[in-house]
Image (cartoon, rainbow, N blue to C red):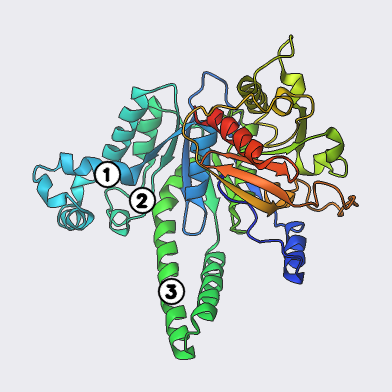
Amino acid sequence: MGCSPSRGYVRDGSGTERERGRRIFRRPKVSIRVGPAVRPLRDDEPRIVFIFGGPGSRKGIVIDRLIQMYGFVLLSAEDLILHQLPKRVSHAIDVRNTHGMSSLLREDPSHLTLDWVLKLMGDRIFADTEKHFLIDMVPNLKFLLKVKSFMKDCTAEMEEFEEHHPCAFALNLAIPEDRVLKQVEEALCKKKQADNMPEVDQQQTDEMDTSRTRRRHELYQSSVRAFLDYFHQTERVVTVDVSCGIPDLIWERVQSFFGEMDFRPRRPVKTVVLFVLEEEDLKGIELAKYGIVKVNLNTLSGDDGCYGSDKLLKALHDYMQGLSQDTENFAVTLAGSCIVQSRKNSLHNKGIVFCDLTDGVHLEDYMCPINPRRKKSLMRKKSVALRPLKAVTSTTTLSCLFQRDIDTELCRQIAVCLAGHYEF
């Protein structure tokens, strides 16, 4: 999240870097199809969303970010089954692990039924009606997908479930089989090049992995079909084409859609803050190109203009949170603030915040252009957008970038103090 640059390359001035840089400006489009019955929700309406995504769909990343940004509670069918099935079976000692559970369900699949799993989910929703719930119905464990009393025509069970817990829509992260296989082939090619594998072994490995992936994809498709058909009948399916396989691009499109549906963010997934000494230092950067909001830290002081450093950074945190639905990128001018005026006014942590400081990063390592098809603009060579920067990243969602001429210890203190407000 905030622990590493969002771009997977190091700037070294080589031709490879320039080629990769050009690719950023031709990033693929992530399309979305929204069912006619899907609409923005009123405040008093339930916010229950089913999510589906097969191998290579980046479903896990999307789930993590939906939880983090919007405060969803994840209800995973697989987790509920693994925790609750042993309690349901009288001889629970036989199903303390997945092997025992698999054997039990082969002998008597009636222990696992769809209505039972949905009842477990309904009980959890009843326990906290104020929460948003994200439901992942399709397990990863193959032996669970083969239980016909669980993976079945779900119409009757879902209609009964929705009598008590109406659902907003189903989010389907779709990726065609041929694209899945292509991703496998690309990964294998890279591995073979690294391992110098003999040609005979390469062919055998290719066949095994391709066959395994195809079977896994077919099993997933057969398992999810009944649920998608159910939501298609009521025109409540939101299909996102995730063929590009790039998590950040997929998330940007999903996040944009949830904003259109009036889901209010609890906190941004990734906030990047560029700190400069003077507003003059921002000249040469197209702020709109990166969706950057400019902030003069001194203007966030109280009426008497004498906020302490800690309180001033808390005000900055609150200001950025207020704009989190519109942008995640900020440029903050330190000139005139108490943080640089009084070095004796130390910044205090709000808790234990671990961070890494990296020197020599660049703006586009952390901020992605929001309009990549635009022609590359002319920037002054002295612009912060082109000069190396210092980055302080933490285990929170925050990445702080600094001009190199800002004192390193001050950079660390600012980043750690600001990150503390995200933790607490």
Q: CA distance from mark 2 to mark 1?
A: 9 Å
- How far from the left and from the top, in percent, is residue 392? 61, 43
Mark 1, Cα crowd under 10 Å, few <14 / some 14-19 / many 20+, is some
Q: Earlier in the sequence, mark 1 or mark 3?
A: 1
Q: Which mark is residue 209?
A: 3
Task: Give the percent coordinates (x, y) of residue 411.
Answer: 65, 38
Instruction: Residue 126 in the image: state x and y as whole percent.
Output: 35, 24
Dot 1: element:
helix
* Residue at the spot 63% in from the left edge and 39% down from the top edge: 409
Looking at numbered disc 2 in the image, what kind of residue is underneath it?
Pro
Left/right placement of residue 33 relative to residue 405 reads: left
Q: Label for residue 139?
A: 2
369 in relation to 271, above or below:
below
Q: Residue at x 74, y 9 (%)?
A: 303
Q: Quadrant of residue 418?
A: top right
Residue that protrudes farthest toward the front in the picture: 344
Q: Label 1, on which residue? A: 81
- What amino acid is at disc 3? Asp
Ranked by sequence position, the earlier of labels 2 and 3 is 2
Label 1 near label 2: C-beta < 8 Å?
A: yes
Question: In the picture provided, is 416 more to the left or to the right than 202?
Answer: right
Q: Amino acid at mark 1?
A: Ile
State the CA–CA distance, disc 1 to disc 3.
Answer: 29 Å
Neighbour tally class for label 3: few under 14, some 14-19, many 20 plus, Cα within 10 Å: some
